[in-house]
Amino acid sequence: MTVTLTLRSQLTAARAASRALPGADRDAWLRAVAAGLRRDAEAVLAANAEDVRAAREAGTPEPQVDRLALTTARIEAMARACEEIAELPDPLGRVLGGWRLAAGPRVTKVTVPFGVIAMVYESRPNVTVDAAALAVKAGSAAVLRGSASALRSNRALVACLRRALAAVGLPEDAVQLVDSADRSLVTELLRANGLVDLVIPRGGAGLIRHVVENATVPVIETGVGNCHVYVDAGADLEMARRIVVNGKTQRPGVCNAVETLLVHEAEAAALLPGLAAELEAAGVELRGCERTRELVPSARPATEADWETEFLDLVLAVRVVPSIDAALEHIATYGTRHSEAIVTRSLESAERFRREVDAAAVFVNASTRFNDGYEFGFGAEIGISTQKLHARGPMGLAELVTYKYVVEGSGEVRR
Amino acid sequence: MTVTLTLRSQLTAARAASRALPGADRDAWLRAVAAGLRRDAEAVLAANAEDVRAAREAGTPEPQVDRLALTTARIEAMARACEEIAELPDPLGRVLGGWRLAAGPRVTKVTVPFGVIAMVYESRPNVTVDAAALAVKAGSAAVLRGSASALRSNRALVACLRRALAAVGLPEDAVQLVDSADRSLVTELLRANGLVDLVIPRGGAGLIRHVVENATVPVIETGVGNCHVYVDAGADLEMARRIVVNGKTQRPGVCNAVETLLVHEAEAAALLPGLAAELEAAGVELRGCERTRELVPSARPATEADWETEFLDLVLAVRVVPSIDAALEHIATYGTRHSEAIVTRSLESAERFRREVDAAAVFVNASTRFNDGYEFGFGAEIGISTQKLHARGPMGLAELVTYKYVVEGSGEVRR
């Protein structure tokens, strides 16, 4: 893959700049970013207003315009996020282990930066600040590629991030915007082996699929969550109701929200009519299997597509299953290995579920909504990994670093 | 990317079979493999003899034929390797950490299998047994793609591996050979997102580049090592001599062998003539910079290509540098982030080198040849990673598993 000269020189400059980060006061930079965002809020809002106007003129649906739009409060939230990241412990230089080789030298396994981390993301401009803040705190340069619709906002935010780098004596090239509407640059970025150490996509299913299917540089796949709650025979139905309602309605647009409810047939009649009424009162549309529709006539018939879909909306698919085996099979077929929950009183069912379900996080009698970096106590989150290489589940600063081995001897050689 | 029906059904069968592995006695399988290899040695040797004959007829260079050829002793070594892997602790079910969420539920981070691990490798047929042994011990199905030149040998070995699966009551599909000379199948395998959890290439630089540049499934890049020894001003020159000779001559064909020697100009005159004589007596060809050639007239002039090349042979590039900065710059430019060594008496130089060199393993006063899973005490090795995602440096069983979070509550929901 050829990388155009402009992108190559950006990536090379990013790597060179990254070398200054591990030894520098990255927390001073984060505080400078927070101050700069507050100081330059008007310029950022003006740039964002242009993006918003262009989006509306292009007929962008209003929820998408809302994700794009910045306000003083949203800028303040970005500034606070930077200050909070500044308070987190440094993820670099942590000794993960150490021992003595049989031949004599001692070995230490110590955390070090990736080098160049690229983020490819969609319209929310706050990702620009979040991603750069976490990458730089983790000692890596950040190469940012947001959506074309947010280009003016991202330019203003990146200018702010770079001014803060200069203000604390760090090279500005440690944060870079891929500043072009040219989509072929994304493909180049995804194939810049040797120049990019890690790409993290953040956005909808289409964006993530595009990145995963085209990237030849190392990727952490994030986000798509077709999550299930399975209510076992004999479960505490009040607990089941609480976990399903929370998983579906507390924040339906996020990846750890519940998309399909699986109910053991022994509990269907006792659980479904009341639960359905409560969900419908909260505005949830139900799509059920035949047995569900006998118990909940208001539910629309569920199609194969409903079992496959991450609705990210007030829609819930419901299926009555004859056994835990059928529930496990359904999850293995349709799940995206994100967050899966069982509600049960049976130790055997709990053990089978935690053992047999292949997912980043498996929940026993708790809401899938806990699969989150803040809830896990990481203090920050760049995304939730749904792949198995390197990081699985919530990714905080500890997942944004790698390690090296340092071997120290006194002249030992191999026999 | 479309995956042809045959490969898709193989990969699907591999995943289904993999589910039986974590709960099974995988060590019994490893011992059955060892017994089977000894019992079926004649059939394996006969199949291998056909591969060897065909390779010779095709004019394959003799060193390559030697890598392809099996002997009773080599089969015995494979069997012993399986028995040794059986003795290693189970990498699955290890608790990596655990804590209580602020909201109440407790979380446990526990090791689990990848699922389907694919290996793409070159002519040595022992990789077939090694790779399957490690993948299955780690609870994953192994999908094996060796070179066309070893196809008959690999068929015989995989038959042996699958018979052992059946013998201990495990599904044979947990070990699969991609049994075709059709190269397009490799590309399909590398792009079978969702069907393959991890691909590990093992072989020469060309094979590894092909895999890394074409794979869209998660990959661990292994192997290419353009490794350096830098001899600092004031170093113990006897120690330097020992480390350079060991790194270059003890086993020149491996990735952690030394390819370029960098010498501080203050030590060049004292070190190079004697060291060159010793290396040349051991059959090493030297390729030096201008200053080196003044001190060692027998050295050929080094070209840009020599700094870039992983010789894997009795060839050493030599460059005299004016400072540690120049050495660090040379390594940053030409190194492959594998194994880099400094010989020094200076604490400051040692600290700069360990901090500033970006490599899987950095050595202070020790041979680069220690960057090895066995030397590190891992008891096995699938390869040495030169990327930063997931695993860096030697990969043993601990690097062949992933983890999941298990969250156990009593009905807690998110606020």
Image (cartoon, coloured by chain):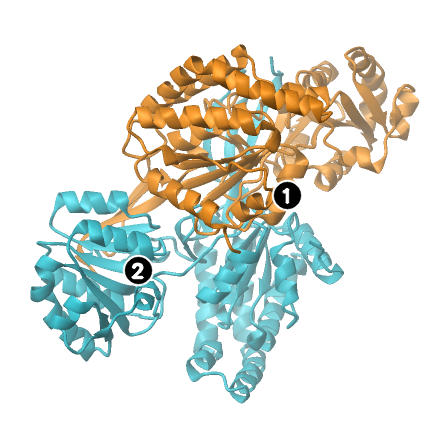
Chain colours: A cyan, B orange
Q: Observer-nearest residue: A88 or B86?
A: B86
Residue for badge 1 = B210
The residue identified by callout 2 is A227
Outermost residue to the bottom: A57
- Picture coordinates of residue B380, whole percent (x, y): 47, 24
Would you place residue A242 above or below residue B20 in this image? below
Q: Is residue B55 above or below residue A326?
A: above
State the CA–CA distance, disc 2 to disc 1: 36 Å
Give the vertical position of A72 relative to B194 (above or below): below
**Amino acid type at mark 2:** Cys
**Which residue is at 65% across, 24% downward?**
B54
**Secondary structure of the residue carrying numbered label 1:** helix
- In the rendered structure, which amino acid carries the disc numbered 1? His
Q: Is residue A364 left or right of residue A115?
A: left
**Residue A234: percent from left, percent from top:** 8, 54
* Position of B80 relative to A168 (above/below): above
In the rendered image, is residue B105 in sight? no
Quarter holding the N terminus of chain A is: bottom right
Local packing at callout 1 (Cα closer than 10 Å; few below 14, some 14-19, many 20+) is some
